[in-house]
Image (cartoon, rainbow, N blue to C red):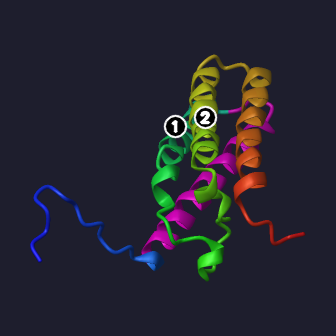
Amino acid sequence: ADAVAGAEVAAPVDVAAVLKEREKNFEAIGDAFKAVRGELEKDAPDFTLIAAKATDINARAAKIETHFPAGTSVDDGYKTEALPAIWQKPEEFKAAAQKLVDESAKLVSVAGGGDKVAAGAQAMAMGGSCKGCHDQFRLDDKK
């Protein structure tokens, strides 16, 4: 049968590659966040470094939405912490990912001001966006 003109056939998902890329992205976000927190524990934080790490988190946060194609949840039999709620509540998931985009962008801006207290507060807000998403959409295997 001829394919309908203009119809796109979804390429089969290479799940192993998706999971690896997804994990790498989140690990890099976590590492960058640890670096920010470490800097903020110093008497004289390097705000340029904080801004750079927040910029990295921001770019990676923007990719989150694309890292979850259908059929890649823990319920699909894969070794992943991605809960089915990601696909059951796509709008909420998109909003949760967007919150990290927004909060990390704010941290870039706040770090530019060189105020340790303000940067610390914004880093906490950014961390809260991570937690907010994890609480709803990530399998917590530590319970």
Q: Magenta region: which residues?
A: 17-45
N-terminal label among 1 and 2: 1
Contact (CB < 8 A) between labels 1 and 2?
yes
User: CA separation, marks 1 and 2?
Assistant: 7 Å
Q: Which residue is drawn at 60% across and 70% down?
A: 73
Magenta stretch holds residue 107: no
For residue 127, which quarter of the picture?
top right
Magenta stretch holds residue 37: yes
- Left or right: 73 as drawn, with respect to 70: right
Q: Name the residue under label 1.
A: 55
Q: Name the residue under label 2.
A: 104
**What x and y, as percent, mark residue 38?**
75, 45
**What x and y, as percent, mark residue 26?**
59, 58
Q: Compared to 21, does 92 lie above or below?
A: above
The amino acid type, in three-letter code, at marker 2 is Ser
Dominant secondary structure of the residues highlighted in magenta in the image? helix
